Amino acid sequence: MSRLRGSVCWTAAVTAVLIVSGCGSTQLATRTARYSAAGPTSPVSSSTAPTSSAIPSSAPPSRSGPGPEDFAAIRRLMAARARAVVAGDEAAFMTTVDAARPAFTAAQRVMFVNLQDLPVTSMSYEVGDSGLTDAPGITGGPLLSPPVVEHVFFAGTDRRPVAIQVDETFVERAGRWHLAADATHVAAAGGITARPWAGPRLDVVVRGHLVVVADASVPGRASSVADTVEAGLTFDAGILDVPVDDHLLVDATSSGSVSTFDNDESAGAVTFAVAGGGHFEATRFAGLRVKLNPQYVGALLSDPVLLRHELTHYLTFQYTGVNPKWLTEGLAEYVSHQPAGLSSEYLSSASYDRLIHRRQAITVTGLFGMDPETDYPLAMACVTYLVDRGGMGKLKLLMNAYALHREAPYGDQFTGQLLRHIYGLTPNQVARGAFDLLDALR
């Protein structure tokens, strides 16, 4: 039976998308979460600005091409646009937009209002010096599409401004440049966007450091998501024995999609980090986001287990990529299924039979996710076995010990050494203990 599944991976990007974890499925029929995993370097987009020597072909023959004065004019235009957002000056913002495109003008007005509802502290743009491919369907004067990065700062939520690559096309009319097309740059890997304000009208809820955005067309959705996330954070932090941390933006809008997994299942949710930095290089951690698949928001809200798993990854973010997947995913399963534990983990008869006949060994990261239906219950059983023998405190000692070896992604080669040092157990003993727990579920 299909379930919500998820993944863990990292990627640095000028579009500021660094995937941490996710969950998804083609069906949502059970009270359980399943999570597959990808490596820490899976690219979502380029970490540097795209380069191109192409000059817009739409420029009339009388022009030899854009010059430094054109790029300078566009920089001034975008600076004025950013100032207008921070100042709440809609008239000034709209003067930057090409009035010859009514539908685009209307969408830009919605974007301005969305940004006013969000806790924007500062905003700025970087504009490059080369011409890229122009957006289609724009008629009239010369066009220019330089590399553009949008920097938006939510000071109460993020550590620094988030850098997001945007695809902008500008048109010159009567000697002045105007913005004629605006889109978030999205690479092929999943279509994730960290820019929900560029979509439909938002409903925004801000609670403490937590920001939740949903489509305004679904009344009360943002508030319901905020309630569920707050409860999940409190629940998870209590199990993990860590402080409640709500420095997070949760996107429940229909803007953008979420990743698909190796088996082409769509994701129910994805947790990702966003990055900041200048000179077209987003290399510094800026904050965290959770994107909910708009198809599955109702199911995610109705079953607290699903978001608890994601929020466990959020609260233990520092271990992502430096702890083995059996440990990070097993912990997320363990926390999200409390207080019932393994007894509440759904398994079909076929999946259980396949699980109980697996080789009794801890699943290494390179193989984790090949059979999610059995990998995740086994990981949860391994973590349950360890927690039973030392509590959450001792498990965190293990996680911190792995984290000391940051030069070795996931640290599977240290499993034997660290289990013996902290628990006095071998990996085989942990695996056998986990299988004893699973066998007791018969």
Image: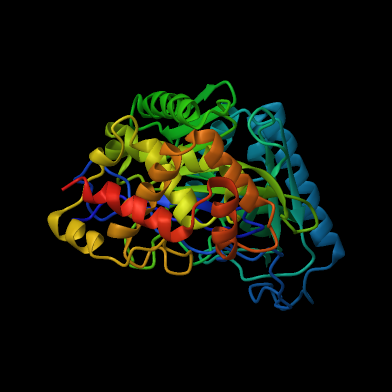
Does residue 327 sit above or below 119 in this rendering?
below
Specify whether residue 24 is in view. no
Seen as rendered, the residue at the extreme top is 208
Q: Is residue 275 above or below residue 90?
A: below
**174 sits left or right of 396 in the view:** right
Horizontal side, residue 26 vs residue 107: left or right: left
Left or right of residue 221: residue 389: right
Q: Residue at x 40, y 23 (%)?
A: 227
User: Is 282 above or below relative to 91?
Assistant: below
Q: Residue 414, position in %: x, y? A: 60, 61
| Viewer-side residue, 393 vs 253 | 393
Counting from the top left corner in percent of width and height, residue 180 is at 60, 55
Residue 310 coordinates in the image, percent (x, y): 44, 42
Q: Residue at x 72, y 78 (%)?
A: 61
Q: Nearer the viewer, residue 429 or 35?
A: 429
Q: What colour-coding does the image apply?
A: rainbow
Give the position of the N terminus as an image quadrant: bottom left
Looking at this view, is 404 or 102 the one in front?
Answer: 404
Q: Where on the picture, by quarter, is residue 15?
A: bottom right
Compare residues 321 and 292 and report the one nearer the observer: 321
Please report the residue visible at 33 percent of the width from the left and 36 percent of the height from the top: 337
Choose top left, top right, bottom left or bottom right for residue 307: top left
Image location (x, y in percent) of residue 440? 21, 46
Q: In this view, which residue lies farthest toward the right? A: 68
